[in-house]
Image: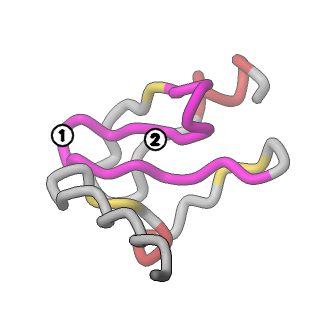
């Protein structure tokens, strides 16, 4: 992800700053507790595509017996 792009991108909901989580490939809004995915270097800035950071992680799928 281009660092220069981070200078102009803001949260589409609160217009606050975002920080890039390189490992998770997400742009994080601390104010709204949302993580916006970055796919193939393109930030997906739709609210319905954001991950809620307050939600518990999805449970792991148990192996079939």
Between 44 and 10, the one lying in front of the other is 44
Q: What label does residue 1 carry, if any?
A: none
- Report x, y in % for residue 54: 15, 53
**Looking at the image, do the residues carrying marks 1 and 2 touch, with CB atoms under 8 Å apart?**
no
The secondary structure that most of the magenta stretch takes on is strand
Q: Nearer the viewer, residue 41 or 18?
A: 41
Q: Which residue is tagged 2? A: 10
Residue furthest top in the image: 3
Task: Name the residue at the front extreme.
Answer: 65
Q: CA distance from mark 1 to mark 2?
A: 11 Å
**Secondary element at image label 1:** loop
Residue 35 relative to residue 54: left or right = right
Query: Label 1: how many residues lie within 10 Å, few (<14), some (14-19) or many (20+)?
Result: few
Q: Position of residue 6 (x, y in %)?
A: 60, 27
Magenta highlight range = 20-39
Please name which of the two marks, 1 or 2, marks the residue nearer to the observer.
1
Picture quarter with the N terminus: top right
Residue at 54% in and 41% down: 26
**Residue at 34% of width from left, 46% of height from top?**
15
- Magenta span has 28? yes
- Observer-nearest residue: 64 or 31? 64
Q: Secondary structure at mark 2?
A: loop
Tell me, yes or no, whether the highlighted magenta stretch contains residue 5. no
- N-terminal-most mark, 1 or 2: 2
Front residue of 40/15: it is: 40
Look at 43% across and 77% down and name the residue there: 48
Q: Which residue is mark 1?
A: 31
Q: Is residue 50 above or below residue 14?
A: below
């Amino acid at each position: 992800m281009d660092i220069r792009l981070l200078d102009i991108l803001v949260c589409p909901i609160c217009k606050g700053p975002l920080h890039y989580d390189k490992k998770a490939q997400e742009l994080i809004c601390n104010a709204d507790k949302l993580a916006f995915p970055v796919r193939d270097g393109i930030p997906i800035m739709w609210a319905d595509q954001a991950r809620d950071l307050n939600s518990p992680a999805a449970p792991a799928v148990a192996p079939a017996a």
